[in-house]
Image (spheres, rainbow, N blue to C red):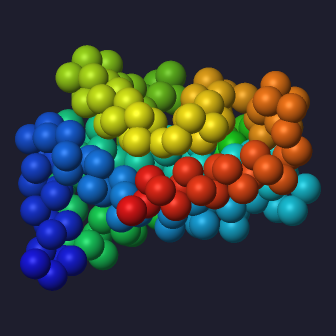
Amino acid sequence: MPLDQAITSWLIHLERGEGEAAERIWRQYFEQCCRLARARFAAPLRREHDAEDVASSALRALCAGVEAGRFDRLESRNDLWRLLATITIRKASNAARHRLGRPEVGESALGGDATGALPFQELSDQRVLGEWSAICDEMIEKLEPKLKEVALLRLQGFTNPEIAERLERSVKTIERYLGLIRLEWSE
């Protein structure tokens, strides 16, 4: 099946709340979102902000929004990438602004409410959270023990230097392990 047809199919399944569709979208777009987020951080901030966190947040927001029916013009691979790129760029920009102590921008264009919260940022649906949790558990279980330990610490919010210190490894080694994890998860 051509990629355009597959992605259209994934979107239909995602609207129905099927976790496998979210996993496929994740696999297809995670690295692209990471690269896009990384490109949005100025050199001094690259060490502070993690593009993977921005990409994960953007993908979660996209999946929750699609399932909730918030995106009515999402019919093709190009539509999906445009929306995902927009979400990723805004999240990266807001993360950088937050780090610099500047106010966030762009929420109103995406339909924020009076509190500034975006409707698709909240994952209150326990079924969605359960599906994501199951996907994460499955992906983590596939890792060899040393990689699993690094992945779990990263998911708990530890920075690369903190993980290196805890595991008595160099930061370069942790970065290499994270690269191996991304590689394994992208397959």
From what the image shows, is residue 172 above or below residue 142? below
In what quadrant of the picture does the C terminus appear? bottom left
Residue 11 in view: yes
Is residue 32 rendered to the left or right of residue 20? right
Q: Which residue is farthest bottom? A: 2
Side (left or right) of 161 relative to 51:
right
The relative height of residue 35 versus residue 5 in the rendered view (above or below) is above
User: Where 177 sits versus 34, above or below?
Assistant: above
| Quadrant in the rendering for residue 121 | top left
Q: Residue at x 52, y 41 (%)?
A: 144
Query: Where residue 69 appears, x then y in whole percent?
Result: 17, 43
- Expressed as whole percent of the image width and height from the top left, the position of residue 11 reads 17, 56
Q: In percent of the image, x 41 and y 34: which residue is there? A: 141
Residue beneath the point at 29% across and 48% down: 23
Q: Position of residue 183 (x, y in %)?
A: 52, 61
In this view, the residue in front, 12 or 100, is 12
- Residue at position x 82%, y 25% from top? 166
Q: Position of residue 60 (x, y in %)?
A: 39, 41
